[in-house]
Image (cartoon, rainbow, N blue to C red):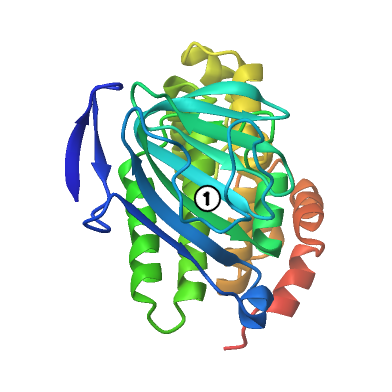
Amino acid sequence: MTMILNTYSDNSIPLFDISKNLAFKKYLPTSELEHNWGFIINDIGHTVIPKNSVYPSTGHPGTHMFSWEKGRVLNEYHFVLITHGKGIFENRFSGKQNINAGDGFVVFPDEWHRYKPLKETGWTENWVGFSGQIPDIIMGNVFVDKEHPIISKCANMLVLNLLKSLFQLITEEPFGYQRTASGVCHQLLAELCNIQQGSETSKQVNSLISKAKYIMHEKIDEDIDFQAFCKNHGISYSKFRADFKKQTGYAPLQFFLLMKVEKAKDLLNNTNMLAKEIAFQLGFKSDHYFSRIFKMKTGLTPVEFRIRHRIPD
């Protein structure tokens, strides 16, 4: 993988060695098999736009061509990563936004948008277009929204290597490459989501969340005072709780209780311990409280769970 020094961000950003040419693009035919799979890779490309060049470049299908004056509407998602240069992105929700090397942005289906490099810098763009039921769920529920389509500083090594894998698969077209490529693209979206959500939380809080999870594992049989934990680390509990829930989907205490329930499942399946003994070992205040929490999280009492799930000796 070739490395260049990006003079705009002072970071070394890997570039793709896809082709000896300045441009590579491929638009893929799709069949009922891809539609049934639920995640379709429609197109992929890499283009170097030198400074003072006409934009966009030619050779795209009519559905994908556009001018800055008119913009464009696609029937698919696009993720575009800029690895060199600067430019501007705009959709009807976000307004004009500056794009720098290392930034990515998301284009949504059936939504007007436009983008271009600055004349004085040009840029290098890398994109993948995708659609399907699975992307609709991901993009609609947990990912970027149309008002905030920019993912800043997302060109880390994992993102770049995943894109490179997509280029390789679609260039070589081995058996089942569409399905494999959709899995790689799914992983790409997961990493972009992690980057976006991680950037919304300070490094200090991310570190404390990791530390709290470690303590939960180590003290699974105890109680943890999360208020005291936050006070000892100089952060308000409300801030820590909000960021913890943003990352995990649960407040710290609920997450800890779920861990205890998972440990209880293991003990019910693999030991002869009574429910009240498990409750005592895992630090519950009473076996009644343990049974209530267990049923709330699993839909079964501990005894019912053991009968239904335990494998006979």
Q: Looking at this view, is 86 or 33 the one in front? A: 86
According to the picture, the residue beneath numbered tag 1 turns out to be 189
Which percent across, then down, holds residue 126? 41, 47
Query: Residue flagged by tag 1: what amino acid is it?
Result: Leu
Which percent across, then down, holds residue 172? 33, 74
Residue at 58 percent across and 41 percent down: it is 106
Where, by quadrant of the figure, is residue 301 drawn?
bottom right
Query: Is residue 122 placed above or below 132 in the rendered structure?
Result: above
Q: Looking at this view, is 250 or 29 the one in front? A: 29
Residue at 35 percent across and 27 percent down: it is 52
Residue at 70 percent across and 73 percent down: it is 306
Query: Is residue 194 placed above or below 230 in the rendered structure?
Result: below
Query: Is residue 289 placed above or below 38 in the rendered structure?
Result: above
Which percent across, then down, holds residue 279? 67, 52
Q: Quadrant of the C terminus?
A: bottom right
Q: Looking at this view, is 249 or 178 the one in front? A: 178
- Viewer can see residue 203: yes
